[in-house]
Image (cartoon, helix red, strand yellow):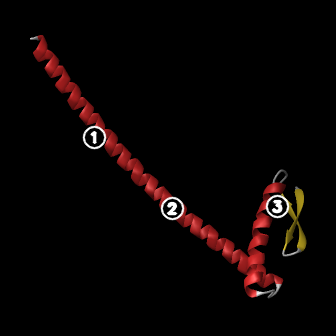
């Protein structure tokens, strides 16, 4: 297990993580630090625990919003796939009908 030192709200914290995940954990900590700093700027230094809680709630809100957008995108993708299937079936029927007409015309011309 690896350890990475991250800075949140001006304080260093050592965090354990899986080997190879140090850069990812550091990036997550930078994002969280940004949230904490934004909260601190908006409400002042109201105590580290409260700042962290408010920043965590902001992050959870972002995650909830992203999940909602993913659900909407997945629903739209399902609708588009269904439409694609219907269009593909209609195109196949049109091609078959056209081929039948061409064959009929060819028979008439050969007669």
Q: Is residue 81 above or below residue 75?
A: above
How would you rate the neighbour count of disc 1 (Cα within 10 Å): few for under 14, some for 14-19, many for 20 or more? few
Looking at the rendered structure, the secondary structure element under dot 1 is helix
Q: Is residue 90 left or right of residue 76?
A: left
How would you rate the neighbour count of disc 3 (Cα within 10 Å): few for under 14, some for 14-19, many for 20 or more? some
Task: Calculate the distance from the C-alpha at mark 2 to the C-alpha at mark 3.
Answer: 29 Å
Label ID, residue 26: 3
Q: Is residue 78 above or below residue 39?
A: above
Q: Is residue 28 above or below residue 45?
A: above
* Residue 16 locus on image (x, y percent): 86, 62
Quarter-of-image position of residue 99 = top left
* Residue 61 locus on image (x, y percent): 62, 73
Query: Which of disc 3 and disc 1 is earlier in sequence?
Result: 3
Q: Is residue 33 left or right of residue 106?
A: right
Q: Which residue is mark 1?
A: 90
Q: Which residue is mark 2?
A: 71
Q: The N terminus is located in which quarter? A: bottom right
């Amino acid at each position: 297990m690896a350890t990475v030192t991250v800075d949140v709200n001006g304080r260093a914290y050592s965090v354990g993580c899986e080997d190879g995940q140090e850069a990812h954990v550091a990036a997550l900590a930078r994002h969280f630090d940004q949230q904490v700093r934004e909260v601190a700027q908006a409400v002042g230094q109201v105590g580290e625990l409260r700042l962290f809680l408010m920043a965590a709630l902001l992050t959870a809100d972002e995650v909830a919003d992203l999940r909602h957008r993913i659900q909407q995108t997945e629903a739209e993708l399902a609708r588009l796939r269904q439409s694609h299937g219907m269009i593909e079936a209609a195109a196949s029927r049109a091609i078959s009908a056209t081929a039948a007409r061409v064959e009929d015309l060819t028979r008439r011309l050969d007669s």
